[in-house]
């Protein structure tokens, strides 16, 4: 596996000259994920749901700055929306490796938060994955991707995929991963409405008998492998919409608006409430994004983030 989304200190556009940014030894990009399909096969004895979902990274990225030194593990960020204590998944990731490998030297973690919070985009999970990868490098632990992915599952269901990156079919709680080769680079608009949804609450209210249409993952993957964007769009499906759209009908309206603006299809990501829409042409996506921004300030023009990609800060699409 390639080294994960990293820029070595010195190569990166050092942000320590910018107010509020720390010095750092390593900066790692942490991309958001969307679920191109999401199926639930049933509820498990441990309370989790058995998933079958195609996960895909997009070029909406947080940046994780790591610096060795000081005492213990400390987390800070540019966002007031995320905790800076041990409840932050990035902190949990660091703590896990510190305990397991009896690490001594202190670590400062600064999170540049660009991914909307509570949005179904794995924002906290991707930060945690970046911290695992970063500590592995800084402390020269030489943990293999398989070991990192195994450890990631202790932190949260989406963290293993965030360690793996790219596109993957995830089963089990989300930790049984099969990498999928790059398909078409997607032109998308992502809209995060001005509210959050609780993942446990959405899963709790899920009823198989309320689902009208289930994803056909083999059909999705066939379209994906053929770069058949029309059928990729047609096969995008998320059973959790049956819960979230009931709770917040605004999500259905956003989907409708995006389709009226020319999207091939629009779908909620994860447990929501973010909606992403797929466009055949990047120009159409750009225009639709401008229109959606009038109503939803958290509207982003996004594309696929492939393993090894880096997202240039100057072209950051946040805000
Ligand atoms: O694993 P994680 O803590 O990210 O999951 C958050 C919540 O989402 C769980 O507490 C559970 O309610 C729900 N979940 C689930 N089945 C999954 C993944 C998550 O029920 N496969």
Image (spheres, helix red, strand yellow):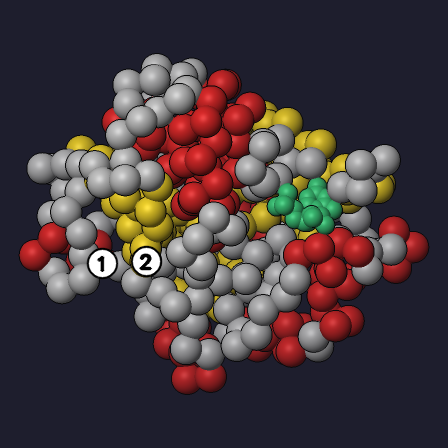
Q: Residue furthest right?
A: 209
Q: Which residue is mark 2?
A: 77
Question: At 43% from the left edge and 44% from the top edge, which residue is drawn?
Answer: 90
What count of labels does the image hold? 2
Residue placed most toward the observer, 166 or 151: 151
Residue 25: where, in percent of width, then height? 18, 36
Q: Residue at x 73, y 60 (%)?
A: 201
Looking at the image, residue 43 lies above or below residue 289:
above
Residue 260 in view here: no
Q: Secondary structure at mark 2?
A: strand
Q: Is residue 127 left or right of residue 158?
A: left
- What label does residue 315 carry, if any? 1
Q: Nearer the viewer, residue 175 or 75?
A: 75
Mark 2 sits near ligand 1, with its Cβ under 8 Å away: no
Position of the N terminus by quadrant: top left
Quarter in which the C terminus is drawn: bottom left
Q: Residue at x 46, y 79 (%)?
A: 296
Question: Would residue 61 be found to the left or right of residue 150 on screen?
Answer: left
Q: Nearer the viewer, residue 171 or 142?
A: 142
The answer to whether residue 171 is visible is yes
Residue shown at the point (45%, 27%) measured from the top left: 99
Residue depth check, mark 2 versus mark 1: number of the one nearer the observer: 2
Label 2 crowd (10 A; few <14 / some 14-19 / many >=20)? many
Contact (CB < 8 A) between labels 2 and 1?
no
Q: Position of residue 50 (x, y in %)?
A: 77, 37
* Residue 243 position by quadrant: bottom right
The disc at residue 83 is none
Q: Name above or below for residue 11 compared with residue 19.
A: above
Reply above or below: 288 against 149: below
Q: Position of residue 228 (x, y in %)?
A: 54, 42
Q: Secondary structure at mark 1?
A: helix
């Amino acid at each position: 596996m390639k080294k994960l989304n990293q820029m070595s200190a010195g190569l990166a556009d050092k942000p320590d000259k910018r107010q509020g940014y720390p010095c750092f030894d390593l900066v790692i990009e942490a991309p958001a994920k969307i679920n191109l399909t999401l199926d639930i096969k049933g509820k498990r004895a441990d309370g989790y749901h058995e998933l079958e979902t195609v996960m895909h990274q997009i070029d909406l990225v947080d940046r994780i700055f790591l610096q060795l030194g000081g005492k213990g593990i400390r987390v800070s960020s540019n966002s007031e929306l995320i905790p800076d204590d041990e409840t932050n998944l990035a902190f949990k990731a660091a703590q896990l490796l510190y305990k397991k490998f009896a690490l001594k030297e202190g670590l400062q973690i600064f999170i540049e938060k660009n991914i909307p919070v509570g949005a179904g985009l794995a924002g906290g999970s991707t930060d945690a994955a970046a911290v695992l990868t970063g500590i592995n490098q800084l402390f020269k632990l030489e943990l293999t991707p398989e070991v990192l992915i195994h450890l990631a599952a202790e932190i949260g269901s989406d963290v293993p995929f965030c360690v793996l990156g790219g596109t993957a079919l995830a089963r089990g709680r989300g930790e049984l991963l099969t990498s999928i080769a790059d398909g078409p680079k997607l032109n998308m608009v992502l809209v995060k409405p001005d509210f959050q949804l609780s993942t446990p609450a959405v899963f709790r209210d899920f009823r198989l008998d309320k689902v009208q249409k289930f994803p056909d993952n083999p059909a999705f993957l066939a379209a994906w492998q053929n770069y058949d964007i029309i059928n990729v769009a047609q096969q995008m499906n998320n059973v959790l919409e049956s819960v979230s759209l009931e709770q917040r009908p605004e999500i259905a309206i956003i989907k409708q608006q995006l389709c009226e603006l020319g999207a091939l299809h629009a779908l909620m990501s994860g447990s929501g409430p973010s909606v992403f829409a797929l466009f055949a042409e990047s120009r159409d996506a750009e225009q639709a994004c401008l229109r959606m921004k009038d109503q939803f300030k958290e509207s982003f023009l996004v594309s696929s983030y492939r393993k090894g990609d880096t997202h240039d800060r100057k072209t950051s699409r946040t805000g």
